[in-house]
Image (cartoon, grey):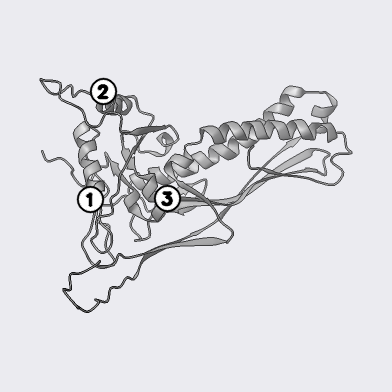
Amino acid sequence: MANITFMEGAGVADSVFGKSQAPIRMFVEKKAEAFEQNSMLPHIFTMGTSKHWAEKFTSMTAMDGFQPVGENGDYPVDGMQESYSKQMEHMVWKDSFSISREIIDDSMTMDLKKKPAAFVTGYYRTRERFGSALYAAAIGKKTVASFMGKNFSTTGADEKCVFATDHPSILKKGNQSNQFADAFSVDALSAAESKMQDFRGDNGEILAVAPDTIMIPNDYKLKKDVFAAIGADKDPNTANNGFNYQFGRWNVIINPYLNPFLTKGLAPWILLDMNYSEEHGGAVWLDRVALEVKSKIAENDANMWKGYARFIAGFNDWRFACAGGVSGGTQLIGG
C-alpha cells in the first residue's frame, strides 16, 4: 500500500462529492503503488526518514590501528577526529487539483479518473526528476542544481561537487578524483572500478569500496556499449576469445529522467556502490512528511484536493560513486 495520508474536510462526505471520495482515493493509491514499485530512487539513493527540520551527516577519521610493541610494551594511544559534515534542510512540496460540481452532476467518469491520476503521477515524477537533476548537475560539475525555480546543493561534505578531481582529506593525506574523462568502454569500466576499490579514507586507509551498479541516461549508443562490455562471458577483442571478467557482475540502471538535465552530446556513465552509501551516507534521500492529501469544498463549490510533502536529497560522502565521460575529468586510460 502506498504511503499516503488522506484527510477529508468537514461536510465533504455529506455533499454531492461524498460518493466520489473513495474512488478518487483508490485512483491515487493505485497510481502511487505502480510508481513506487518501479522507482529508480532506491537504487541511486539511500532512502530514509527524518523527524527534524534538518539532518546533519558526519563521520570520524579512522584510527591508526594496532602497533607491534613487543613483550610488556606500553599501549600506544590511538585517536580519531570528526571528518567533514553536511547538513540537509527539508523542502516543502505542494500541488492541488479540483473537481467541479458539474463533473459530478454530469457523471463524467473519465474526468473523475484523469485528474487524480495526473496529480499523483506528477508527485512521483517530480521525485524521480528531482533525484536525477541532482546527479545531472553534479555530472556537469555544478555545485548547485536548479530545479523548478529552487536551488539545491550537489556538494558533498567536503564542499566539493560530489564528482570532482580534487576531493581533499581533512588530515591532508592528498586529493582524490572520482570524475573521469574517458568514454565508456570495457577498459574504462575496469579502470574506474579499480580506482573506486582504491578510494581512501581521510587517514589514507583503504575502504574496500565495491561498485556493482552502472547508471546511464537513455542513450542507445551507451546502452550498446555497456551491454557489449558486460553481456558476454568471452572477450570479443581477443583472438582466442579470452574470458571477460566483467560478465554478470553489474546491475544496469537506464535512467531516462537524466536526459533532460544533461548538456546535449554528453554521454556520462556512473558507477555506484550503494552498500557503501548505506553505511556512510553517500547519496541520501530523506522523507520528512510523506504525501498528505486533503479534500475540502472550495468557495466555488468545487471539490479541492491538495497535496503536501516534505523531503530533501543530496550527497555526503563522495566515495560511493564515480562519473565517467566528463570533459575535463581525470584520464583513466593513457593514450
Mark 1 Cα shell of 10 Å, populated few (<14), some (14-19), many (≥20): some
- Three-letter amino acid code at the position of disc 1: Asp
Mark seen at residue 198: 1
Residue 240 drawn above or below residue 37: above
Residue 175 seen in this snapshot:
yes
Mark seen at residue 232: 2
Q: CA distance from mark 1 to mark 3?
A: 19 Å
Residue 295 location, x and y as percent?
Answer: 76, 42
Residue at x 43%, y 49% (from the top left corner): 145
**Label 3 element class:** helix
Drawn side of residue 221 relative to residue 55, left or right:
left
Camera-side residue of 250 and 94 = 250
Location of the C terminus by quadrant is: top left
Residue at x 22%, y 50% (from the top left corner): 198
Drawn side of residue 58 relative to residue 183, left or right:
right
Which of marks 3 and 1 precedes in the sequence? 1
Mark 3 Cα shell of 10 Å, populated few (<14), some (14-19), many (≥20): some
Please tell me in which quadrant of the rendered image residue 224 appears. Answer: top left
Q: Which residue is mark 3?
A: 278
Number of callouts:
3
- Three-letter amino acid code at the position of disc 3: Glu
Please tell me in which quadrant of the rendered image residue 2 appears. Answer: top right
- Is the residue under label 1 in contact with that under label 2 (CB below 8 Å)? no
- Is the residue under label 3 in contact with that under label 1 (CB below 8 Å)? no
Residue 329 seen in this snapshot:
no
Q: CA distance from mark 2 to mark 3?
A: 30 Å
Residue 97 location, x and y as percent?
Answer: 70, 38
